[in-house]
Structures are given as structure tokens and as C-alpha cells.
Image (cartoon, grey):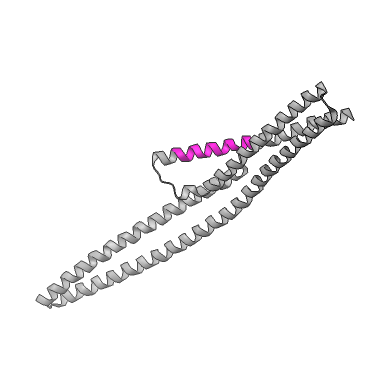
């Protein structure tokens, strides 16, 4: 399992919890908005009744409705402040994770890039080695195996770098994708693909080391 997968899953769980909390607060804000609108309509009806019959009971009803409207506005404002605080905290958490993830992905990407550079340089070095030692049959066999390892290392490293780009793009994707079956399937396929990318990262390192060891052992033995 990739080292960063636990962090990503933990972030997804926290994001899901934050989204549910924000959605709940939004629903409450809308409910109090509806209550306020109903009270406002009721207040208008009371005012009309007061014009027809200015009795003390209508005054009491009006005062009671105004008090309820004030409480509804107060609760709505409190929920709005809580919602804004949650959104700010969530944004800071996303920014913190993005910065950490970029640093993590940059290190892995640079490592894969170094593998491709060193493998390419090794192929050039092997070509020079063949020119020095000529067409020794044993050398040709060693060169073929070593070249194959370096070519595999380059291909695997390039695939690994592509995986790094996908993984970097996937960070925080849970925050914007929908909840439909299609979106969940696509996210699952993306996660499986990203986990498989680690096979290429490991393969590039193993192939590079194998090619280097093979050609080094041959050079030492031939010295």
C-alpha cells in the first residue's frame, strides 16, 4: 500500500465528515429561513387584523411573532458563522494536505526522472563499452541483458511519472466528484490504477539496479 494512501483516505474521511456537517448546517439555515418567511407572512396577517380590530390580543400576537422572528434571525446568523468557520477550517486543511502531497509527489517524480536519466546514460556508456571491447560473444550477451534492464527501467519510470501526475490530480478529488454510481465506480478504478502505478515505480528501480549490477560485474571480471 502506498505511504500516502493512508493520508489520502484519512483526508477523504475528514472531508466527508466536514461536507456532511456543512450540509446539515445549510439545511438548518434554510429551515430557519422558511420559518422567518412564515412568521413574516403571519405578521402581515396580524397587522391587517389589527387595522380592522386594534385589540390588545393582536398586539400580543404581533410582539410574540416579532420575538420569534428575532430568535430565528439570531439562530440563522449563528449557524452562518459556524458554517463559515467550518468552511475556512476545511479550506486550510485542504491547502495543508495539498502542500504536503505536492512535496511527496515531487520527491517521487524526481526519483523516477533520475532513473530515466541514469538509465539513458548507462545505455550510452554500454555503447561505448561495446566499441572498446569489440564483438566478444560473452559481452554481447551481457550487453543485451543489461540494455534490456535499462530499457525496462526507462519505460517503467515513465509510467511511474505518469502515475505521479494522476495521483497529484486525484488529491482532493473526493471533494468535488458526485455521489452517483458512475462517479463512485470511476473513483474506485482511479484508486486501483494509482495503486498499480507503484508496481512501475518498484520495477524501474529493480530493473535499473539489475542492469547496473550485471554490467558492473562483467567489467570487474574482465578487468
Viewer can see residue 132: yes
Can you tell which quarter of the image residue 136 is in?
A: top right
Q: Is residue 191 magenta?
A: yes
**Which residue is painted at 59% across and 44% down in the image?**
164
Q: Is residue 43 above or below residue 196?
A: below
Number of labels in the image equals 0
* Left or right for 17, reference 95: left
Quadrant placement of the C terminus: top right
212 relative to 10 in the view: left or right: right
Task: Give 59 or 81, whichever is nearer the viewer.
Answer: 81
Q: At 20% from the left edge and 70% from the top edge, which residue is drawn? A: 43
Q: Is residue 85 magenta?
A: no
Question: Is residue 53 visible in the rendered structure shown here?
Answer: no
Residue 81 versus residue 171 in the image, above or below: below
Residue at point 56% right, 47% down? 168
Our reading of the magenta stretch's main secondary structure is helix
Return the x and y of residue 75 as percentages of the image width and height. Answer: 35, 66
Q: Is residue 98 left or right of residue 73?
A: right
Where is residue 213 drawn, in percent x and y? 79, 32
Closer to the camera in the image, 175 or 34: 175
Q: Could you tell me which quadrant the N terminus lies in? A: top right
Residue at the outermost left position: 52
Q: Quadrant of residue 42?
A: bottom left
Question: Magenta stretch?
Answer: 185-200
The one nearer the camera, 163 or 99, is 163
Residue 163, percent across and down?
A: 58, 41
Q: Residue furthest right?
A: 223
Residue situated in front as seen by the camera: 177 or 49:
177
Amino acid at each position: 500500500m502506498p505511504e500516502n494512501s493512508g493520508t489520502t483516505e484519512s483526508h477523504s474521511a475528514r472531508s466527508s465528515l466536514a461536507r456532511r456537517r456543512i450540509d446539515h448546517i445549510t439545511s438548518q439555515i434554510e429551515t430557519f429561513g422558511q420559518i422567518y418567511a412564515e412568521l413574516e407572512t403571519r405578521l402581515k396577517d396580524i397587522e391587517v387584523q389589527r387595522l380592522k380590530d386594534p385589540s390588545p390580543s393582536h398586539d400580543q400576537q404581533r410582539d410574540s411573532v416579532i420575538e420569534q422572528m428575532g430568535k430565528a434571525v439570531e439562530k440563522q446568523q449563528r449557524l452562518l458563522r459556524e458554517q463559515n468557520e467550518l468552511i475556512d477550517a476545511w479550506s486550510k486543511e485542504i491547502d495543508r494536505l495539498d502542500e504536503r502531497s505536492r512535496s511527496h509527489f515531487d520527491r517521487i517524480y524526481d526519483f523516477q526522472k533520475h532513473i530515466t536519466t541514469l538509465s539513458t546514460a548507462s545505455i550510452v556508456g554500454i555503447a561505448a563499452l561495446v566499441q572498446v571491447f569489440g564483438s566478444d560473444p560473452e559481452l554481447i550477451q551481457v550487453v543485451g541483458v543489461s540494455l534490456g534492464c535499462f530499457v525496462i527501467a526507462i519505460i517503467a519510470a515513465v509510467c511511474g511519472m505518469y502515475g505521479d501526475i494522476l495521483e497529484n490530480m486525484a488529491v482532493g478529488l473526493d471533494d468535488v466528484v458526485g455521489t452517483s454510481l458512475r462517479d463512485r465506480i470511476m473513483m474506485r478504478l482511479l484508486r486501483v490504477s494509482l495503486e498499480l502505478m507503484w508496481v512501475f515505480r518498484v520495477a524501474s528501480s529493480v530493473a535499473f539496479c539489475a542492469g547496473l549490477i550485471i554490467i558492473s560485474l562483467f567489467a570487474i571480471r574482465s578487468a
